[in-house]
Image (tube, rainbow, N blue to C red):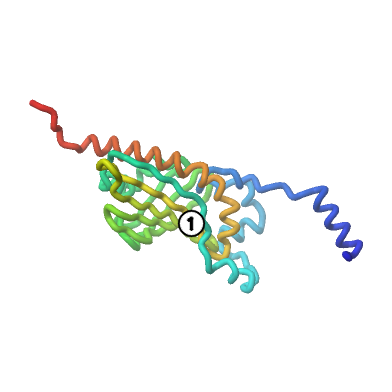
Amino acid sequence: MTSPAADSFAERSRASPPAGPDWAGRTGRAGLGGAAFHGNFWSSVLTGTLCLDPKILSAHTSYMIAIAQAQASSTASPSAFFARWADVATWPEWNSDTEWVRLDGPFAAGSTGVLKPKGGPKVKFVIDSLLPGREFVDVSLLAGARLTFRHLVTAGPGSRTRIEVTVTMTGPLGWFWKLALGRGLKASLQPDLDRLVSAAEVADEAVAPDTSPA
């Protein structure tokens, strides 16, 4: 049996559910912006000053949250894709929700940089892993979480290249960032990969040797 006060609170909750945050449907990393970040709570999340009970946080730090996955097949060579990824200034040409990207160092594991989502604050990232021709992993460093983009390139049938992109989240505030960014990332990841494939194929054709008869 519940108390009258508890019954009253439950009734009010059913009658007036809280409005959903307006960033929940924003596209990809652009969901970092918007009115939802106004106020002390959102400011504390962005600046990393939000304090939560360590017992609560520890329950969220030991597992990886799957966010989105995309796959594609291409006639472009693996090197064509790594050339596109290495040229970070051109990422906005195929990454629809990114305004600009800066890499502070070589395109190599351990290098860091900054990217600016459309409508959102700047975000630091790090190249976590780089195996030329095979794997490229970059991690966006959010407050209380790490947003990981793993790009895997393998040989496909018929001399084609297979590309797979997996997005995951880890960290004590991973649950929060999944709510903020998950829906948008799922919607944008495949179209962004398709645009990357087109860009890589165009670049690959431009440098391919001319084998037509003289």
| Secondary structure found at label 1 | strand
> Eyeballing the image, is 39 above or below 27?
below
Position of 63 with respect to 10 (left or right) is left
Q: Which residue: 30% across, 46% down?
A: 156
Q: Residue furthest front?
A: 157
- Front residue of 143/20: it is 20
Residue type, mark 1 in image:
Thr
Quarter of the picture holding the C terminus? top left
Between residue 37 and residue 197, name the one nearer to us.
Answer: 197
For image coordinates 25% across by 39% down, the residue present is: 204
Q: Residue furthest bottom?
A: 55
Residue occupying the far right of the picture: 4
Which residue is farthest top? 214
- Number of numbered discs: 1
Q: Position of residue 87 (x, y in %)?
A: 31, 47
Number of residues whose C-alpha sits closer than 10 Å to that of mark 1, classed few (under 14), some (14–19) or many (20 or more): some
Residue beneath the point at 52% across and 46% down = 186
Left or right of residue 41, residue 110 in this image: left
Q: Residue under circle 1? A: 168
Quarter holding the N terminus is bottom right
145, 46: nearer the viewer: 145
Dividing the picture into quadrants, the one containing residue 109 is: bottom left
In the rendered image, residue 158, in percent from the top left (x then y), is placed at 26, 41
Point out residue 84 in the picture as x, y percentages from the top left corner. Answer: 31, 45
Residue at 27% from the left image edge and 52% from the top image edge? 133
State left or right for residue 194 relative to residue 28: left
Question: Residue 152, position in %: x, y?
Answer: 35, 52
